[in-house]
Image: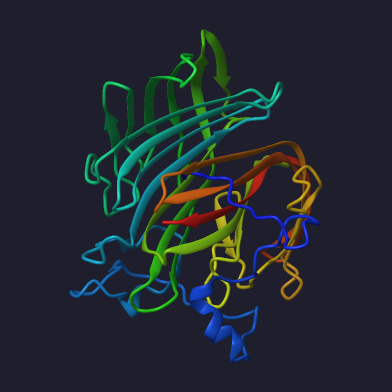
């Protein structure tokens, strides 16, 4: 997403303030007490619409599913609608990401490439009027951006998808990509609808551990994508957001004993809603974690370990050891957004399908972002 360094110093000048555990929109509910961090979430079984005829949240859409079942028919609610298709392709030596988004104020395409060996980061950004590009209502549909500055196309989605990208980085370094995202048969995804209120809500579809083959070229240097070591991670988001918001997000992905293993963890933005984006994927099968996770990290020292755990269910206890942390941002006045991403390796354990899996050295990231949008 678009980003802005948004941390503030504590009043006494003694460090960085910790973000609250939940967003202001649910503060009154949390103050009343009685909220449990462990709860039951409804599994959706049939296709449904995200919104009713007035643009309000459709109650039948609230829940989670193993496949994308909810059509994001956002209507009205300008300028609170936020729509994005974010993809991150990560291996043990680089991260390549493209964000296509429309936040009602504007639409944009943003690209980032990070060399995890050297720490070098290259960014490109193209902003246009809202509606410049079409963002589909359903997850597994093609997307594209075409401008003199940047071209991007992701064709397909329900099965394998072909990606082509070309732009010159802001420093004049050309970035080119041509590769295929593989979707193994029966590979499930984590799809959730999070309700803050009837007029403020979010649909997220998270896809993890998708093998990639092809290459990315940066300034003439080629980075090959090997399916066993390079995985695609998708974050499809459609919703109506409050003006001020923040979140944690983390991803662990890799191969363990021959199985594709992925973990998606989130925090803060879902607390107080009875919904979350926490799940474990083993061999293509999703195991939902019905608990608000605990996040432990030091915002004054991003390179210290990040620990994420589920003390209630015991399903997750993972620690990210960062090898690189980067803070990025953008401030357009009324619209501003920013945060820090720590890339590294995860270790610890997850419990899924009645067995405990020891995680050691799987790649991924953890992040904290704050938005005024």
With 238 as the anchor, is 218 left or right in this view? right
Residue 334: x and y in percent read 39, 53
Residue 187 seen by the camera = no
Q: Nearer the viewer, residue 303 or 95?
A: 303
Above or below, 146 relative to 298: above
Q: Nearer the viewer, residue 199 or 134?
A: 199
Q: Nearer the viewer, residue 242 or 214?
A: 242
Above or below, 209 relative to 306: above
Residue 271: x and y in percent read 58, 73
Residue 68: x and y in percent read 38, 58
Q: Quadrant of residue 191?
A: bottom left
Above or below, 215 relative to 287: above
Residue 320 seen by the camera = yes
Query: In the image, what residue occupies the spot 46% across and 50% down?
Result: 336
With 347 as the anchor, is 183 left or right in this view? left
Query: In the image, what residue occupies the spot 36% across and 45% down?
Result: 101
């Amino acid at each position: 997403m678009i980003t802005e360094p948004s941390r503030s110093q504590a009043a006494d000048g003694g460090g960085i303030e910790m973000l609250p555990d939940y967003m202001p929109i649910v503060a009154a509910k949390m103050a009343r007490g009685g909220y449990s961090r462990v709860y039951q979430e409804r599994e959706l079984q049939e296709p449904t619409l995200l919104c009713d005829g007035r643009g309000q949240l459709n109650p039948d859409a609230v829940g989670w599913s193993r496949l994308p079942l909810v059509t994001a028919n956002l209507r009205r609610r300008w300028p609170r609608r936020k729509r994005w298709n974010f993809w991150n392709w990560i291996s043990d030596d680089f991260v390549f990401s493209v964000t296509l988004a429309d936040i009602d104020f504007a639409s944009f395409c943003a690209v980032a490439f990070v060399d995890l060996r050297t720490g070098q980061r290259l960014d490109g950004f193209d902003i246009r009027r809202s509606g410049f590009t079409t963002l589909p209502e359903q997850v597994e549909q093609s997307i594209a951006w075409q401008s003199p500055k940047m071209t991007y196309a992701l064709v397909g989605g329900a099965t394998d998808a072909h990606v082509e990208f070309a732009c010159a980085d802001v420093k004049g370094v050309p970035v080119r990509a041509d590769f295929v995202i593989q979707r193994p048969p029966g590979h499930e995804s984590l799809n959730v609808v999070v309700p803050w209120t009837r007029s403020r809500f979010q649909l997220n579809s998270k896809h993890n551990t998708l093998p990639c083959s092809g290459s990315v070229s940066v300034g003439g240097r080629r980075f090959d994508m090997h399916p066993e070591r390079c995985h695609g991670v998708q974050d499809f988001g459609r919703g109506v957001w409050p003006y001020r918001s923040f979140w944690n997000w983390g991803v662990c992905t890799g191969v363990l004993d021959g199985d594709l293993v992925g973990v998606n963890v989130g925090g803060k933005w879902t607390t107080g809603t009875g919904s979350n984006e926490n799940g474990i994927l083993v061999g293509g099968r999703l195991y939902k974690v019905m608990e608000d996770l605990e996040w432990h990290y030091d915002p004054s020292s991003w390179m210290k370990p990040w620990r994420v755990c589920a003390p209630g269910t015991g399903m997750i206890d993972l620690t990210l050891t960062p090898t690189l942390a980067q803070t990025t941002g953008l401030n357009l006045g009324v619209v501003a957004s920013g945060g820090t991403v720590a890339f590294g390796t995860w270790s610890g354990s997850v419990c899924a399908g009645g067995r405990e899996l020891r995680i050691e050295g799987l790649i991924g990231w953890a992040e904290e972002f704050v938005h005024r949008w």
